[in-house]
């Protein structure tokens, strides 16, 4: 889609949603005078801040960008929930007028505004505190060489404008507490906008694990306008696998690059070209889990993915669940082969999580 059309459609949708919220607020008497003026100005400026900082961030880094990007990014879920609340309030207002019920619509609207604000505050806090999620995998294929060992899975940190070196250091501390034998990073370690890669990614060099740290890219790595600097920096602190296989502990560790569109034949051909064979146990990193069922059918012992974010916040989470179904999050077993999707440690676009949990996944092999 043409970028101008996309941005125009995005701003148009935001504008329409903002208009509904604003008009309902005015109609019930919640927005008036100076309050209405301030609300109207913010509804115009915040989406513009988001779009402009995203555009500028693709080519140049500035710490000032964060102060304009974050308010615009937080505004997206805030506006979504305000819109839902406005629809409810609008219906109550219509019913109250139509049937002369005297419903205290203004007070209800104020209550909903307070609830939405509190919900967004919780979502901001929740997104900053990744939890440790542990899965036990009972795999006869992996048991010989991996029994009693620990694999840590971390995806979607989205380092960049919002999540920076401090957050990555926090993630690394949590990883090291798990005493990992192997750490897997299946993509979206960065968000896309350029930043000082060497400094931001440096904490990854502090990870302690028996067999090292392996990274394969996701879709957001492709959004960077300075690929050379990024891959130079990430290669200093991890082993990078892009459609390649590395043998660790008598097991194929395969990293498959992100592809937006690909047939089953093309996908499986790429797997074979990576060096994968079915004569030994295998662990495949695949950022987007949409093709994971092909890998399980092919005999891949364990596939790990991220990408879904579990939708980050409702109702997006319901949409993502309808798309990815059982591969949205957690463990899927088929014919003795396993797949794990993580919700991710960070966030994309908006630094808010409501109804989903940022996580670091610990995989224990029985």
Image: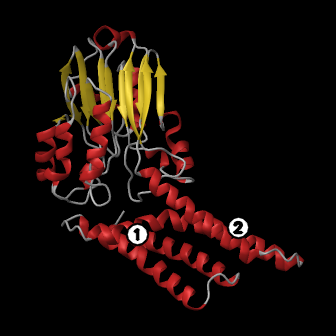
Total numbered labels placed on residues in the image: 2
Q: Could you tell me which quadrant the N terminus lies in?
A: bottom left
Task: Return the residue at label 1.
Answer: 71
Residue at 30%, 34% (x, y): give it. Answer: 175
Q: For the residue carrying disc 1, how many other residues have a C-alpha within 10 Å: few (<14), some (14-19), or many (20+)?
A: some
318 to the left or right of 306: right
117 to the left or right of 262: right
Residue at 36%, 31% (x, y): give it. Answer: 304
Disc 2 vs disc 1: which is toward the camera? Answer: 1
238 to the left or right of 81: left
Task: Return the residue at label 2.
Answer: 88
* Alpha carbons under labels 2 and 1: distance apart: 25 Å
Residue at 56%, 62% (x, y): give it. Answer: 118
Is the residue 124 above or below the residue 308 in the image? below
Helix, strand or loop under label 2: helix
**Residue 207 occupies quadrant:** top left
- Position of residue 125 measured from the top left corner of the image (x, y, whole percent): 45, 54
Is the residue 295 above or below the residue 80 in the image? above
């Amino acid at each position: 889609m043409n970028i101008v059309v996309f941005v125009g459609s995005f701003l148009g949708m935001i504008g329409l949603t903002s208009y509904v919220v604003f008009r309902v607020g005015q109609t019930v008497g919640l927005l008036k005078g100076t309050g209405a003026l301030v609300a109207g100005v913010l509804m115009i400026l915040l989406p513009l801040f988001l779009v402009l900082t995203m555009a500028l961030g693709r080519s140049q880094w500035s710490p000032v960008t964060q102060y304009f990007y974050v308010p615009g990014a937080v505004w997206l879920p805030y506006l979504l929930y305000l819109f839902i609340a406005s629809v409810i309030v609008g219906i109550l207002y219509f019913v109250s007028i139509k049937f002369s019920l005297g419903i205290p619509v203004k007070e209800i609207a104020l209550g909903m505004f307070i609830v939405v604000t509190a919900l967004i505050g919780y979502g901001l806090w929740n997104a900053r505190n990744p939890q440790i999620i542990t899965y036990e995998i009972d795999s006869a294929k992996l048991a010989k060489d991996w029994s009693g060992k620990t694999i840590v899975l971390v995806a979607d940190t989205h380092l960049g404008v919002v999540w920076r070196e401090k957050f990555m250091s926090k993630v690394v501390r949590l990883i090291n507490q798990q005493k990992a034998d192997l750490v897997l990073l299946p993509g979206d370690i960065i968000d896309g906008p350029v930043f000082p890669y060497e400094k931001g990614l440096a904490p990854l060099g502090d990870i302690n694990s028996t067999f090292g740290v392996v990274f394969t890219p996701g879709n957001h790595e492709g959004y960077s306008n300075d690929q050379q600097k990024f891959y130079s920096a990430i290669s200093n602190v991890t082993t990078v696998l892009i459609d390649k296989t590395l043998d660790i502990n008598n097991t194929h560790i395969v990293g498959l690059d992100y592809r937006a569109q690909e047939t089953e034949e093309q996908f499986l051909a790429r797997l074979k070209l990576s060096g994968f064979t079915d004569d030994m146990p295998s662990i495949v990193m695949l950022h987007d889990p949409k093709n994971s069922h092909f890998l399980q059918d092919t005999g891949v012992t364990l596939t790990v993915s991220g990408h879904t974010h579990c939708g980050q916040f409702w109702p997006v989470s319901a949409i993502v669940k309808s798309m990815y179904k059982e591969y949205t999050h957690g463990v899927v077993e088929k014919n003795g082969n396993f797949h794990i999707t993580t919700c991710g440690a960070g966030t994309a676009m908006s630094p808010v999580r409501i109804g989903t949990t940022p996580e670091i996944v610990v995989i224990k092999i029985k």
